[in-house]
Image: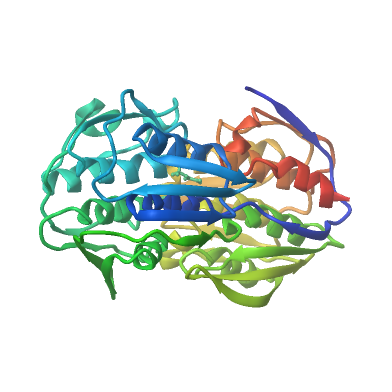
Amino acid sequence: MIQSQTLSASGGLRGEITVPGDKSISHRSIMLGSLAEGKTRIQGFLEGEDNLSTLKAFQSMGVEITRLGEGILEIQGRGLHGLREPADVLDCGNSGTTMRLMTGLLSAQRFFSVLTGDQYLRRRPMKRVVEPLSRMGARIWGRDGGERAPLAINGGPLRGIEYRSAIASAQVKSALLLAGLYAEGETRVYEPHLSRDHSERMLGFFGAELQTFDGGVSIKPLPRLAGREVQVPGDISSAAFFLVAALITPGSELLVRNVGINPTRSGIIEILRQMGGDLQLHDERTLSGEPVADILVRGSTLRGIEIGGDLVPRAIDEFPVISVAAALAEGVTVIRDAQELRVKETDRIAAMVSELGALGARVEALEDGMRIEGVAALKGGRVKSHGDHRIAMSMAVAALRATGEVTIDDTACTATSFPNFWQLLAQVKG
Ligand SMILES: O=C(O)C1=C[C@@H](OP(=O)(O)O)[C@@H](O)[C@H](O)C1
Ligand SMILES: C=C(OP(=O)(O)O)C(=O)O
């Protein structure tokens, strides 16, 4: 369904909100709950389209998953060898995480399966998982020599490998760890910078034999995982839209409750603080092995900074909204080492340059990032989401500081990761 949204400037965001559950952790809780023995109960599960794709895929493989209430699921785990061959193609929708992690898992199952996705996902690169999994003995076919979905997988026995990934990708790392749960011997994955470590934390929580070390992680096969109670924290990538919205809007004071602040995800907090943002963490605590806090944010004068290196994977999904903060900051912001943005749901560098540019921002594309010169305000206009949830929500944030109305076309995609985004924004926008 194509929708559009029209927004005008905000006089300050005020109040308290709770953002929906973390998307990455929600995917992993379904996967590990299905592979565990006994019951897994999940609270705070994100009922966004991406996670529902993962949920349906596991139901198609015979896993009983019951919804007990909003964001509460109970999974009857089938054990590591209890999945059944799906009778039809598994549709991963828009979700790269679903497709890449499932490719790892399905490579080890003794049945045939096919993964497909929507028009955006079918354009995204898959060799990054297909190639190392093939080295483990996986038999996977796809378009363009295995680069693009649909992917057909003839699962079977695997052997552990040592793999040095050229990119810091949690999806690559997690695909190999899931395959490594079944492989003969040890599977070791090295990455150039540490990517989000939710798989490592949750695999450990479910009892897997896993070791993290400087530069990587290793896993050994094991006979069983044990069902657990998982509490999913709020998604910092969703909170990020509200953090930036409050910072760029004078007069704002907003409390975002229950946000996951895992250090491999919290690059956005460091970046916004370096830009001069007033962000305070309160009531820091741990939920199911993941650090969580409430974040209090106030309208601030931001300044341009340089961003690159190991901070990039720790804030990878936040660059569209970081570019909005930069567009309204004093001075120049340069984002480098972020070429991965080009292979997300859309090319997020090209999309933000074009859409922010349409509102009068001074943004230039770099091969691996963006150069942004701040302006005092944006202007009204009509912009597009490019079918990408994070572009749609970033442009909604930009609209809060535009001198005229901004209409964003094709906004239904926000349901991918943040189904109640527009309601929450209306609630605090003022
Ligand atoms: O593992 C995950 O849950 C994710 C990893 C990241 O992708 P890459 O592994 O491609 O960096 C991120 O962009 C995505 O939103 C979720
Ligand atoms: C890149 C994203 O997700 P995925 O790779 O799972 O589609 C995202 O949510 O920004």
Residue at 19% in and 46% down: 133
Which residue occupies the foreground of this view, 224 or 5? 224
Which residue occupies the foreground of this view, 423 or 303? 423
Which residue occupies the foreground of this view, 88 or 268? 88
Residue 352: give x, y in percent of width and height.
58, 42
Q: Does the rendering let one see residue 259?
A: yes
Residue 18: give x, y in percent of width and height.
71, 57
Residue at 41% in and 57% down: 337
Residue at 65% in and 40% down: 419
What is the image's colouring?
Answer: rainbow
Numbered marks: total? 0
Q: Is residue 245 positioned above or below 212 on the image?
A: above
Q: Say which quadrant the N terminus sits in.
A: top right
Q: Is residue 131 positioned above or below 220 on the image?
A: above
Specify whether 405 is left or right of 33: right
Residue 251: give x, y in percent of width and height.
87, 62
Residue at 55% in and 46% down: 364
Specify whether 246 is left or right of 103: right
Q: Does the rendering let one see residue 128?
A: no
Figure quadrant of residue 222: bottom left
Specify whether 349 is left or right of 339: right
Specify whether 111 is left or right of 269: left
Q: Is residue 57 positioned above or below 230 on the image?
A: above
Residue 387: give x, y in percent of width and height.
56, 31
